[in-house]
Image (cartoon, rainbow, N blue to C red):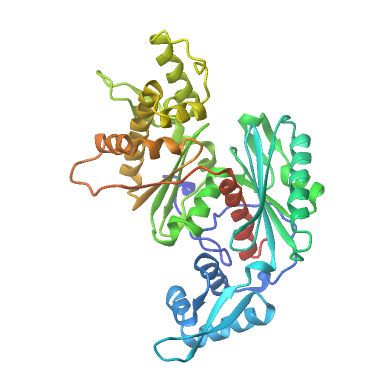
């Protein structure tokens, strides 16, 4: 095992769950986050994730005394980072002070980029979506994409022109890799290699920017605002144009430079044939694989259907409407997805598995086939695997991109 394969604790001052590694210098927006201690950052993170909390509850979550909670939160209240409200306790009739982050003090922009669309959202510090927009990508040239992004940001800003809160950071995610949060090392679907994207976006929008992998950002979002609020250990499986796998253990995202390379797509998935046949997940659990299976199905039946060359979304829609061929194709897809989930769970031992992505609807429609697929590669005595399916929403992926800057703001890095 090489050093980079081992999980390392974050450096002093890093927010819990933040990945480690070298990062290029990022312009810093004004704010009160840079002067916080590690424990103060933990307090802020707990309040962001769970909302308003009593001091007693916060003490239990962070593991500090009553004296420490007062000493650490007083300067945060004075700076406006935190707000305090008094609430009557029904049992005693006495007021009790509750704390919360002033989520409306700043605005964040999250942008997710695919080969066909750019989706952007404007959020507060709790990642509540205040406005969203979606634009078609017709030109993959970096300068064209940056111009489109600047247009999207302008649209978002115009919708909250009277808001008054500053936009302090922009997170941009895509199906590619960026080791320093500034440069896109590789994004195959866009034909990009070594694109200095953050610098170009900052020049076009005036907003400090971080770039990252979309799967990694979605895993972080689940950790902070989704499954991570109830589970210390879980997996995220995404299916669509590609297939991805994210892992959280002990309340931290397990990551490395290789995590952005889509290695899960190379895992062989058995299809249940006799004799059994295995194909890489990328070859049997993507939109392209679903579309190929559909075409083969219709060709074998000599159908002259107008949907013979249908895209994956249309095939799923036909299955939802009860089309027999589409149901068979999607059921087979769901069975293989279940096998893939079972294989990954054998190594990661998650408490729950989240299924997301453009084709997550297949798992919802054919839940029984997913569970059969899991059972095919799982010992009967093992505990039932909890599988939760997220409805696909590109705005949620853009919201995940905003996690990049929220994490950096809390850590005092942006």
Query: Can the viewer see residue 299 in this picture?
Result: yes
For the point 18% across and 46% down, the residue is 381
Q: Give residue 330's quadrant in the image.
A: top left
For the point 53% across and 70% down, the residue is 47
**Closest to the observer, 333 or 339:** 333
Residue 317 locus on image (x, y percent): 47, 30
Residue 246 locus on image (x, y percent): 46, 46
> In the displayed structure, does residue 204 sit left or right of residue 403?
right
- As drawn, 379 above or below 27: above
Residue 233 locus on image (x, y percent): 38, 55
- As drawn, 408 above or below 35: above
- As drawn, 405 above or below 238: below
Question: What quarter of the picture does the C terminus occupy?
Answer: bottom right
Residue 87 locus on image (x, y percent): 51, 84
Question: What quarter of the picture does the N terminus occupy?
Answer: top left
Outermost front residue: 321
**Closest to the observer, 264 or 393:** 393
**Closest to the observer, 306 or 253:** 306
Query: Can the viewer see residue 202 in this picture?
Result: no
For the point 51% across and 63% down, the residue is 16
For the point 50% across and 59% down, the residue is 224
**How many marks can you see?**
0
**Closest to the observer, 274 or 249:** 274
């Amino acid at each position: 095992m090489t050093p980079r394969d081992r999980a390392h604790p974050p450096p002093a001052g890093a927010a819990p769950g933040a990945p480690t590694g070298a990062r290029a210098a990022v312009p810093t927006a004004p704010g009160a986050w840079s002067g916080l201690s590690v424990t103060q950052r933990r307090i802020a993170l707990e309040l962001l994730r769970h909302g308003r909390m009593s001091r007693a509850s916060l003490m239990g979550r962070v593991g500090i005394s009553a004296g420490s909670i007062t000493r650490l939160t007083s300067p945060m209240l004075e700076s406006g980072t935190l707000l305090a409200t008094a609430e009557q306790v029904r049992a005693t009739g006495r007021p009790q002070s509750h704390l919360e982050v002033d989520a409306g003090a700043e605005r964040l922009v999250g942008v997710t980029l695919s080969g066909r669309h750019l989706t952007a959202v404007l959020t507060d510090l709790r990642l509540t979506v205040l406005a969203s927009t979606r634009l078609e990508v017709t030109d993959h040239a970096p300068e064209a994409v940056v111009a489109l992004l600047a247009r999207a940001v302008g649209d978002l800003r115009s919708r909250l022109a009277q808001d008054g809160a500053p936009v302090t950071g922009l997170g941009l995610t895509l199906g590619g890799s960026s080791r320093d949060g500034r440069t896109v090392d590789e994004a195959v679907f866009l034909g990009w290699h070594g694109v200095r994207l953050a610098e170009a976006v900052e020049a076009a929008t005036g907003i400090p920017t971080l770039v990252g992998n979309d799967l990694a950002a979605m895993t972080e979002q689940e950790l902070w605002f989704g499954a991570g609020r109830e589970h210390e250990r879980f997996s995220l499986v995404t299916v669509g144009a590609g297939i991805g796998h994210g892992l959280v253990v002990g309340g931290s995202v397990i990551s490395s430079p290789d995590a952005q390379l889509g290695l899960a797509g190379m895992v062989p998935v058995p299809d249940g044939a006799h004799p059994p046949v295995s194909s890489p997940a990328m070859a049997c659990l993507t939109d392209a694989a679903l579309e190929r299976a559909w075409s083969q199905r219709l060709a074998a039946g000599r159908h002259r259907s107008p949907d013979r060359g249908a895209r994956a979304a249309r095939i799923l829609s036909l299955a939802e409407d009860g089309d027999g061929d589409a149901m068979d194709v999607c059921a087979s897809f769901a069975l293989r997805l279940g096998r893939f989930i079972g294989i990954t769970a054998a190594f990661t031992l998650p408490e729950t598995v989240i299924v997301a992505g453009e084709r997550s609807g297949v798992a919802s429609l054919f839940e029984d086939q997913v569970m059969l697929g899991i059972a095919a590669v799982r010992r009967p005595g093992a505990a039932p695997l909890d599988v939760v399916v997220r409805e696909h929403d590109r705005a949620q992926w853009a919201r995940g991109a905003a996690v990049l800057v929220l994490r950096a703001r809390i850590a005092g890095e942006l």
